[in-house]
Amino acid sequence: MKTFYILSAFALIGTCSTPKFTTKIQNIKDSIKLVDSIYVLNYANTVTIKDLKTHLYEFSSKKFEGRKVGEKGQKLAVEFLKSYYINENIASPFGNDNYYQSIPKSFFSKEIKSSENVLAYIEGNEKPEEVIIISAHLDHLGISDDGQIYYGADDNGSGTAAIMEMAQAFNLAKKEGYGPKRSILFLHLTAEEIGKQGSEFYVQHPVFPLENTITNLNIDMIGRVDNIHKNNKDYIYLIGSDRHSKELHYLSEKINNTYFNIDIDYRYNEEREKHHYYTRSDHYNFALKGIPVIFYFNGEHRDYHEPTDTPDKIDFSLLQRRTKLIFATAWQIANQDHRITLDKDNELLK
Ligand SMILES: [Zn+2]
């Protein structure tokens, strides 16, 4: 039996790495040309530990009562995000001071109140109609029956703080004359914890046409270390990056290998992986619409979905490195000469 399994494994590897397929993949790798290496690092370096700390401690503080969808704490959390973007002078796609995409109560199951996604936007200089979405959910689990707050510092204060810093960095670049060619939507999603309902609503009511939504980079928990990596903390799981666009996958690899050398762990990207993380956060609703996605994730830990997921346990220097990686990846997608190619349209794969 053992031998049989080993032989089958070899047979499988054989079919995936035929000389022809290897050549095609090499051609895709060779076709990726990184843009603006000086500028991308300049602006990536404006992502600071100090700011990440300030945002994350505030966002996962008691005041927001665990940010349960539709409840008072979640309303305060969206106001907090809105004030941030107003202060930073980063516009909303709706104009004026309207940063909310409201989701009516009727969209949810009966016990949930109306809620809102928060949207901030930087318009591209050359191809404004092509949009990259950087997303993270803003909601969490609220307060337990015995009165304990679920702070959700990692889940998903980490992703939220990362987006706030990236938006500031892209905005500074734009002010200094290096704004992105394509547009970037910073999308803070509600109702993830009750079944990815905020992103479901967004894809049903897209603010920018989904045909021109060229990539979704989704962040859900990037501030901690899981048990698997206790002795190798400089890692991150990437999930989904090769499903719709091999170009996106190899572009992401190249950015990391060139600038950061974080240990990228793809174990949860396996198609039949038992945790099914690919289907478990907001990027999945974009992937179902055929949009290339990358899901950034640190894995589960003992405080996952517990009141003990608190900001003092966040590793801020790791959060900073991971945020820079995502920023540089978004920068490349926004600024390279051509739009990310879907595998089905990729001549190099034919
Ligand atoms: Zn989450």
Image (cartoon, rainbow, N blue to C red):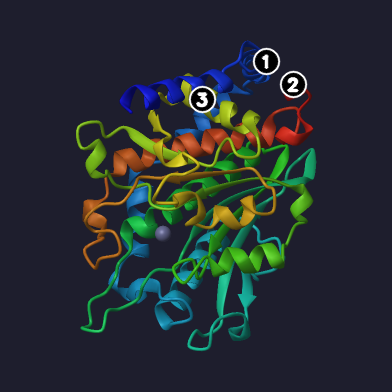
Q: Which residue is mark 3?
A: 12
Amino acid carrying label 1: it is Asn
Nearest the eye: 334 or 27: 27
In the rendered view, does 310 fall on the left or right side of 326? Answer: left
Tell me the quarter of the image containing the C terminus.
top right
Q: Which residue is most to the front?
A: 1
Tell me the quarter of the image containing the N terminus.
top left
Q: Which residue is mark 1?
A: 27
Nearest the eye: 25 or 270: 270
Q: Which residue is mark 2?
A: 348
Q: Secondary structure at mark 3?
A: helix
Assess disc 3: are there few (<14), some (14-19) or many (≥20) residues with their C-alpha within 10 Å of its C-alpha. Answer: few
Which marked residue is nearer to the observer: mark 2 or mark 3?
Answer: 3
Q: Residue at x 31, y 32 (%)?
A: 234
Residue 42 numbered tag: none
Q: Residue at x 54, y 83 (%)?
A: 109
Amino acid carrying label 3: it is Leu
